[in-house]
Image (cartoon, rainbow, N blue to C red):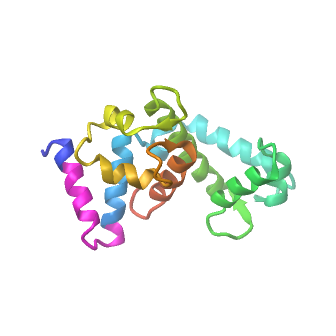
Amino acid sequence: MLPRILFLAALLALAGCGEDEKSSASREGEILRELGARGRAGLPQEQLDAYAATFGFLDADENGLVSIEEYEANSIFGNSFSARGVFGATDRDASGQVTLDEYVENRIITDEAKEIHQQIDVDGSGGVSRDELVLRTSWSDALEGIFVEFDRDGDGEIVQIEWLITWGNWARLPGVGLV
């Protein structure tokens, strides 16, 4: 078996060679798993039930769908801007309604991503530095390409929203198998 660093370097090299969506998803899936992703398989049924119960609370009219109005009125977000942003990320088919499956998928992805981001942020700054990512993964040679993909604004620190955007996009790729 190749050492982890050589394996990840090979994955990064493949990323620039015009691979199809499936092999790209394999690369991203491997990176997420290396960072600690377990996805749906890592959750006890009780947690999935809790997500479903929260969805039921949000679905005030009990029609099996959550509208933006219901989400704004019943979610934990204190302002419309935040509620609409999270709603938009959850409504993957852009139907204007969130289904139970969309809601649970989003919670699985975001809760796990937030937890892992917090674990990697060892100094508690709210952002993940290159050094902190190296401590988590031992990816010194392959790190730069991965870090740049997460550090969307290029400031040398991966804040939680950057982490969530990249993590969420990768976790939802066909073939990654986390949700």
Q: Nearer the viewer, residue 68 or 127?
A: 127
Q: Residue at x 64, y 40 (%)?
A: 49
Q: Nearer the viewer, residue 85 or 126?
A: 126
By secondary structure, the bulk of the magenta-drawn segment is best described as helix
Q: Residue furthest top?
A: 123
Residue 71: x percent and y percent?
79, 53
Give left or right: position of 179 versus 53.
left
Quadrant of res 128: top left
Q: Residue furthest front?
A: 155
Q: Is residue 87 above or below residue 17?
A: above
Residue 51: x percent and y percent?
66, 43
Q: Is residue 21 above or below residue 52?
A: below
Q: Does residue 56 appear in the picture of this structure?
A: yes
Q: Residue furthest left?
A: 1
Q: Residue at x 72, y 42 (%)?
A: 53
Q: Is residue 100 above or below residue 41?
A: below
Give left or right: position of 173 versus 22.
right
Per the rendered image, the range of residues in magenta is: 7-22
Q: Nearer the viewer, residue 57 or 12?
A: 12
Q: Residue at x 47, y 32 (%)?
A: 121
Residue 49 is inside the magenta segment: no
Give left or right: position of 76 versus 25.
right
Residue 61: x percent and y percent?
87, 55
Q: Residue at x 49, y 59 (%)?
A: 169
Residue 15 is inside the magenta segment: yes
Quadrant of res 170: bottom left
Residue 165: x percent and y percent?
54, 54
Q: In which quadrant will I find the N terminus? A: top left
